[in-house]
Amino acid sequence: QPLHRGARRSRSIASVAAPAVAAAACALVWFGGSGSSPMYSEEAAFAAPAGPSRLSSNAALTRSSEALERPSPRAALSAFGAAGKVASPAAGAGARGSRGLVAAAAAAAAVVAPSARSKYITGISWYLSHFVVGIGNDAIMKFLGGSLPPFQIVFLRFSFAAVVLLPFMISQGSAAFKTERLWMHFVRGALLALGIGLWCLGLNLMPFASCVVVNNTMPFFKMAFAKIILGETVGKERWLASIGGFIGCMLIFNPTGATFDPRSLVLVLSACCFAMLDIFNKKYSMSETIVSMLFYGSVATAFVSALRAYQTWVPVLPAQWALFAALGCGANLLLFCLLKGFQYVDASATCPYRYTEFILSAVLGFLVFGEKPMASTLLGSCIILPSVIYCAYIETRK
């Protein structure tokens, strides 16, 4: 009877998750191939041999890049004029004419290029979208966690994530499977599996509220790693907004009553793993295609978690397989939104927005499940929201 009741609950959740599976699959097929950077690529321009025409083209490209960074009408017209001076004398000169056309194309790109403020808003919007997908994934994983061990859930989730991508990748041919850095995908998978494993271990050592607060030190590690590894400029507004968000997190979860256990430092290591994973995603999101990042990251995570999943394996009900299919699509859609965000903004720029997940969870809980937020949630939100608004105001003013 308990198994039949579990099957009925699984079927009800599967019926709700089915539209999400379809939407996620459509989004991946529609956007999956767009793994290129939104910035202008200069590889074609610099492939030409050196000479006077190339120097002129490079000067035009320099003005074009200035227009990209400061897209005012005057800068755009200046870049277009510089490209015209290169293109006109070279129009009838064969190869030199093609270099002139490259410079003209660069000027045109500078004219229509998005502003820094537009790119920031676009990148943060993608980043916030991955939280919405993540909340749905967490709800399914929490339900499955009542009857399945953690590593089995991780293994099946990312196995399905790789499987649902296969039809699209096969239709694109062998080029879709090419990657320059297979080792990097293995490291990403190992970081994710290790972070999840340490998180599950920490849940057995400390109360849930304390685990959440410790895990949300991750933005501070990410900002430090971004400065050291990626060379990003991490301004004081990002640190201040992240500190404000962390204080709001502590007010929401109120971990002060918990007894400290030195073994709970595994949660700090878990936060470091997730922070380093974001650094890898940011570093290679511009050079690797999004499809390869999704596919090989899922394969690596499933491979790393396979042994532990086998050791703790329990039978899976038929209706639960549908939930794992939804989780697979959700895992791909979540990482897709994250990688798209990293194509537009720095990794450290997303740190203050990490704490908006609590507010989004409270809003969705109220709208979907009718759960009224507690007073501590409202109080914490009153600190998190101003911190995020302050950061967004400073970042978009630059």
Image: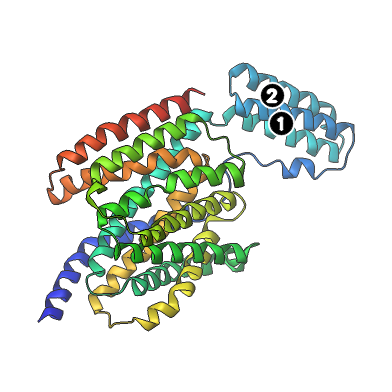
- Mark 2 touches mark 1? (CB < 8 Å): yes
Residue at (60% x, 39% y) in the render? 39
Question: Closest to the observer: 259 or 129?
Answer: 259
Q: Position of residue 147 (x, y in %)?
A: 23, 74
* Residue annotated with mark 1: 104
Say which amino acid is labelled 1. Ala
Where is residue 343? Give x, y as percent: 53, 44
Label 2 Cα neighbours within 10 Å, binned few <14 / some 14-19 / many ≥20: many
Please, is residue 323 above or below residue 340 in the view? below
Q: Residue at x 64, y 39 (%)?
A: 40
Residue 350 location in percent, x, y? 45, 41
Q: Residue at position x 40%, y 33% from top? A: 241
Which amino acid lies under the numbered mark 2 shown in the image of this protein? Phe
| Residue, disc 2 | 80
Q: How many marks?
A: 2
Q: Earlier in the sequence, mark 2 or mark 1?
A: 2
